[in-house]
Image (tube, rainbow, N blue to C red):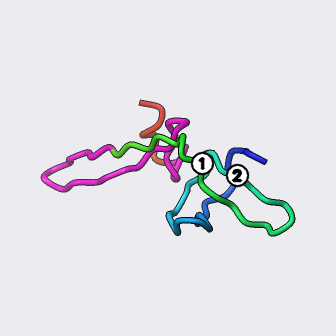
Amino acid sequence: MQLLAKYAGKCQATGKRFNVGDLIDYDKATKKAVLVAKNRSESITLFNEGKASTFYRNARGRCEDAPCCGCCTI
């Protein structure tokens, strides 16, 4: 069944990490999750006093730190 991930995890098919809110295909019997290819993640790099910080957003536009850092509400 396809659902939005409640927890960050690792795709059993590819080994790629997924974040909270990413679309996954979850198998209740084996308790394994596979990342669905429709996810569109993007990265945002912010520079402050010459120091770069990169944040990754999932298909819902939320980062793994949301809403703590506030980058998703800008």
The secondary element bearing badge 1 is classed as loop
Amino acid at pointer 1: Val
Identify the residue shown where x is 42% and y is 40%.
Answer: 71
Q: Which mark is residue 36?
A: 1
The boundaries of the magenta stretch are 44-68
Residue 52 located left or right of residue 16: left
Identify the residue shown where x is 55% and y is 36%.
Answer: 60
Residue 8 located left or right of residue 54: right
Between the C-alphas of marks 1 and 2, the distance is: 6 Å
Please state the horizontal and vertical placement of residue 67, each as a whole percent of the image.
Answer: 55, 43
Q: Are marks 1 and 2 in contact (CB under 8 Å)?
A: yes
Q: Which mark is residue 25?
A: 2
Residue 25 located left or right of residue 13: right
Q: Residues within 10 Å of mark 1 (few under 14, many from 20)?
A: some
In the rendered view of the protein, which quadrant contains the C terminus?
top left
Please state the horizontal and vertical placement of residue 12, each as a whole percent of the image.
Answer: 62, 68
Identify the residue shown where x is 31% and y is 52%.
Answer: 54
The secondary element bearing badge 2 is classed as strand
Q: Is residue 49 above or below residue 74?
A: below
